[in-house]
Image: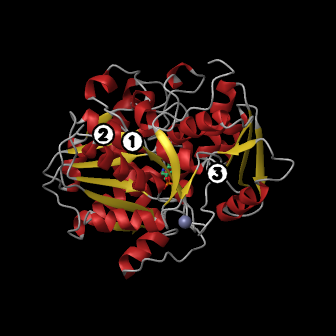
Amino acid sequence: MSETTAASFGAATHLVCRACGAHATLGADYSCWECFGPLEVAYEFGTVTREQIQAGPLSLWRYAPLLPVPANVAETRTLSPGMTRLQPADNLAKALGITGKLWVKDDSGNPTHSFKDRVVAVAQTAGIQLGFKTLACASTGNLAQAVAAAAARAGQRSVVLVPSNLESHKIQATAAYNGYVIGIDGNYDDVNRLCSELIGEEVSADWGFVNVNLRPYYAEGSKTVGYEIAEQLGWRLPDQVVIPVASGSLLTKIDKGWREFTSLGLVEEHPYRVFGAQATGCNPVSTAFADGQDVIRPVKPNTIAKSLAIGNPADGPYALDAVRRTNGAIGDVTDAEVVEGIRLLAETEGIFAETAGGVTVAVTRKLLAQGLLDPTAETVIVNTGEGLKTLDAVSTGDGFTATIAPSVDSVSLVIASGK
Ligand SMILES: *Cc1c(COP(=O)(O)O)cnc(C)c1O
Ligand SMILES: [Zn+2]
């Protein structure tokens, strides 16, 4: 990269307001100057072929032509996340009574073990283009770690703001990268409001907040989950997908990615249904869905699924739109069901998910029982994070089946007693 190169956002041409359609230039703007609606990146794509993508790097940067990033982004110092496995889940399918094919898109395989590495990689790249020196965010935990790690890789300063009651190992894991980790006495929505207030202040003049002033770029990173699912299925779309919902951005963007792939001719047109998953302790989008409302009423989160605990979800209305347009649904489950979901996925598929993954598995089970998900269709569920991040949720006693003397007899006794 030469210093004289002008900012480049690839095929992205401008920002567009999702509420009123007003245009803005590509910059660190996130809300419309006319109506305060959320801004989204717009593109003019040229021809993009399967061969071109397949020849790219084994990371999300293989989709660089579809993202607001320069063409040489793979050579820059990012963590290059993505291309996580799409694992067939026949045992889980059996346990759930699914007779169609079931897959788990396992995004716990990213560098900091959640899907947040994707959104950070795109926001970080855009932020550097826009001249920000510090990488910052408001976080419920996973984003903090992704930001701190990405900044370390790029030699940037990081400042992350998190609710002070976050799981302590998430804080420790973030602190390892040696950026600023600031605990805020308040919930995520308080932290988010503080970050909005910091925009334009002197102390934070050179901070690019990945999920505030860089949010339009950040959100585009989530499209790559959808792209990968389609490519890994052999360039086609599944019948149904179940996605955890916090702000609603991931769900909205998987749908956007599939619509782009379809309109670019990278996959054949195929009707698919989008399903959302929330915890009952933070279910504003699920509630609006159940009540047939367009407006999302904010809630005060109270759930072990902290990575999904956004009480006032910015993209909630757009998530509702995607779900309704595709004839999907949104469900929510109790914390006890979340734990069951984590255990079920671990026992059947050897995938240990964080609480968000437990939410997704448990909601899948619930939507099947309600007849909303089709058990005969091909289904993908998205696991967004690694179980070690929320170990407390499944900890029971000391974890041992038994503690015994080092003798064959003792082992035999344990096995004979069963589990
Ligand atoms: C952030 C996050 C989500 C969902 O994010 P959205 O805000 O809805 O895009 C899901 N799972 C995990 C583990 C997360 O960290
Ligand atoms: Zn607008």
Q: Which quadrant of the rendered structure holds the C terminus?
A: top left
Q: Distance of mark 3 from mark 1, alpha carbons?
A: 20 Å
Q: CA distance from mark 1 to mark 2?
A: 6 Å
Determine whether, in the image, residue 109 is placed left or right of residue 6. left
Quadrant of image for the N terminus: top right
Specify whether residue 348 is in view.
yes
Residue depicted at x 18% and y 50%: 270
- Tell me residue 235's x, y (percent): 22, 35
Which SS class for mark 3? loop
Say which residue appears at 42% left-offset and 57% top-offset: 359
- For disc 2, the neighbor class at 10 Å (few under 14, some 14 to 19, many from 20) is many
Q: Nearer the viewer, residue 75 or 160?
A: 75
Seen in the picture, residue 283 relative to 120 is either above or below; the reply is below
Q: Write down the residue under mark 3.
A: 139
Is there CB contact under 8 Å for labels 1 and 2? yes
From this view, report whether residue 51 is shown above or below residue 137. Answer: above
Q: Which residue is mark 1?
A: 225
Could one spot residue 395 in this view of the protein?
A: no
Separation of residues labelled 2 and 3 (CA atoms): 26 Å
Kind of residue sitting beneath label 1: Val
Residue 128 pos. (x, y %): 66, 33
**In the drawing, does residue 382 fall left or right of residue 245?**
left
Label ID, residue 229: 2
First in sequence: mark 2 vs mark 3: 3
* Front-lying residue, 174 or 34: 34
- The tag earlier along the polypeptide, 3 or 1, is 3
Residue type at mark 2? Ile
Three-letter residue code for mark 3: Ser
- The secondary structure type at the circle numbered 1 is helix
